[in-house]
Amino acid sequence: MRMEGSENVMEWRTILSETKSVENEKIVEFSLLSGSTRFDEFVINLSVGKHSGDGECNGNTTIKLNGRELGYYLFNKNLKTNGFNMYIEARTRPIPNIKKSESVNLLAYNAVNLMNQNSFNPDNLVDPSKFIMTFPAEYTGTITVEIYAR
């Protein structure tokens, strides 16, 4: 186990920092920094704008990081009504775990509850070096993702 102040602490590295505008996409992929599968701790700032396209975009959005699904139904939203801003910490060891806080408004100016779930499927590296969002329907809007890892 890495302890702060010990010489075994790895520095945080930016493996993704991107804003993408999409139109009528059900699956949105972002490429991560090469070699990102070797990390076991991640911090994610995720902002998904309100769905501006025709029709509904309501239900669970599946999010995968390096092929690992982030949580179980943590992103069940009606994006036609509101977008969302999330701060997520995910780790694969010693126990797979996700901590998430979210707000419709900016997290920088709002105190929100922290949700914890021990579901970060650590054994399914099907899409290494990718951050993939699968929406419940075709999504139109803007997504901003920042991911740091160590």
Image: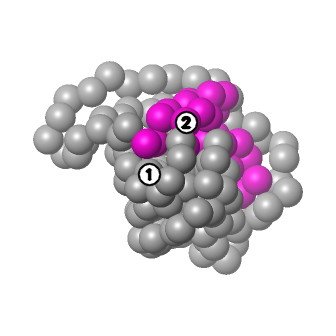
Outermost residue toward the bottom in this view: 34
Residue tagged 2: 58
Q: Amino acid at mark 2?
A: Asn
Q: Nearer the viewer, residue 122 or 53?
A: 53
Q: Is residue 77 magenta?
A: yes
Classed neighbour count for the residue bearing mark 1: other residues with Cα under 10 Å, few (<14), some (14–19), many (≥20): many
Vertical relation: 35 (above or below) 67: below
- Please provide percent x and percent y for residue 21: 45, 70
| Callout 2: SS | strand
**Where's the N terminus, which quadrant?**
top right
- Please provide percent x and percent y for residue 25: 62, 62
Q: Is residue 86 magenta?
A: no
**Where's the C terminus, which quadrant?**
bottom right
Residue tagged 1: 51
| Magenta-highlighted residues | 57-80
Residue at position x 38%, y 25% from top?
114
**How far is the residue under mark 1 from the one under mark 2?**
10 Å
| Callout 1: SS | loop
Residue at position x 14%, y 41% from top?
109
Outermost residue toward the left in this view: 109
Residue at position x 50%, y 53% from top?
54
Classed neighbour count for the residue bearing mark 2: other residues with Cα under 10 Å, few (<14), some (14–19), many (≥20): some
Residue 30 appears in the picture as rendered: yes
- Please provide percent x and percent y for residue 10: 51, 59
Residue 97 appears in the picture as rendered: no
Q: Amino acid at mark 1?
A: His
Of callouts 1 and 2, the N-terminal one: 1
